[in-house]
Image: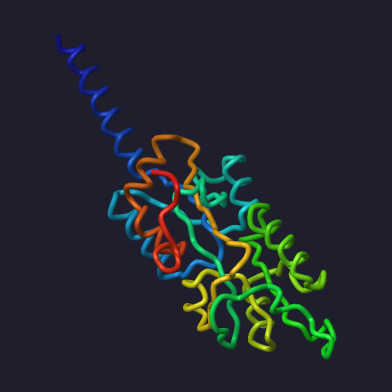
């Protein structure tokens, strides 16, 4: 019986080692760019408390999806229509100067007394350069009579912020982002713009584990809770 007993012990030791290594396995998560660094730090701290080694990679929506498809990350925060999201974040327009009430796009239409080049421009961040946000905004701008160049996708938040601080330009942001950047935020009357975020994982077991470990902190980093609401998924 000695040899079978040794085999059982070795098998038990191997199993325990595999369990330990699984708990220490790094899990790479692709998150949106522009999140507050302290809020992302809270996400990492929560993962450590849950016994996980989480590695965060900031990227734009198409890049996040590609990283997951190519196996470069095990999970991503996907940009989806609001009804399909785990979380939703309401968007509006932010600028250097406050605007009373809701902003109507036709209020930004060039007047006959000022050239179109002096009219306020609306900057859309790369994070929102997705069909379910970009297309309704561009269609509404055309219906409101805005010039073709008045709404454009900016290269970065820094570029948009520079334009906003130097002019009457506006940038599409959440209220959470606007407050963080000390900008005046107003709701957009039409169209309603809502970011939807869904946590998608290559392995189903990682999905439940991640939600339990960092769901609250990740929602805060995405801006859920301020000008936001829970999404359509349970």
* Quadrant, the C terminus: top left
Quadrant of the rendered image containing residue 165: bottom right
Does residue 206 appear to the left or right of 46 in the view shown?
right
Residue at x-position 50% and y-position 66%: 35
Quadrant of the rendered image containing residue 70: top right
Q: Where 71 sits versus 42, above or below?
A: above
**Colouring scheme, one of rainbow, by chain, secondary structure, one colour:** rainbow
Does residue 46 appear to the left or right of 78 in the view shown?
left
Q: Where 140 sits versus 117, above or below?
A: above
Q: Where 23 sits versus 46, above or below?
A: above
Residue at x-position 33% and y-position 33%: 18
Residue 202 rendering spot, x and y as whole percentages: 50, 37
Residue at x-position 45% and y-position 47%: 232
Residue 213 rendering spot, x and y as whole percentages: 33, 50
* Quadrant, the N terminus: top left
Does residue 114 appear to the left or right of 183 in the view shown?
right
The foreground one among 122 and 213 is 122
Most distant residue in the left direction: 1
The foreground one among 45 and 79 is 79
Residue 191 rendering spot, x and y as whole percentages: 63, 62
Does residue 121 appear to the left or right of 202 in the view shown?
right
The mark total stands at 0
Residue at x-position 37% and y-position 53%: 215
Residue 193 rendering spot, x and y as whole percentages: 58, 61
């Amino acid at each position: 019986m000695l040899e079978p007993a040794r085999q059982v012990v070795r098998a038990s030791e191997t199993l325990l080692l595999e369990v330990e290594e699984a708990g220490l396995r790094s899990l790479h998560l692709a998150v949106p760019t522009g999140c507050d660094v302290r809020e992302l730090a809270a996400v990492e701290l929560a993962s450590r408390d849950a016994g996980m080694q989480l590695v965060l990679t900031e990227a734009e929506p198409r890049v996040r999806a590609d990283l997951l498809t190519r196996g470069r990350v095990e999970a991503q925060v996907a940009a989806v229509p609001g009804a399909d999201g785990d979380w939703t974040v309401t968007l509006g327009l932010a600028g250097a100067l406050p605007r009373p009430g809701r902003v109507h796009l036709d209020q930004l239409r060039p007047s006959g007394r000022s050239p179109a080049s002096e009219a306020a421009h609306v900057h859309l961040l790369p994070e929102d350069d997705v069909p379910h946000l970009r297309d309704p905004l561009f269609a509404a701008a055309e219906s409101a009579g805005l010039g073709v160049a008045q709404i454009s996708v900016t290269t970065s938040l820094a570029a948009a912020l520079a334009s906003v601080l130097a002019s009457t330009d506006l940038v599409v942001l959440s209220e959470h982002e606007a407050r963080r950047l000390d900008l005046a935020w107003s709701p957009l009357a039409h169209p309603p713009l809502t970011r939807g975020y869904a946590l998608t994982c290559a392995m189903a077991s990682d999905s439940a584990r991640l939600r339990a470990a960092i769901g609250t902190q990740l929602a805060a980093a995405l801006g859920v809770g301020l000008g936001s609401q829970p999404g359509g998924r349970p």
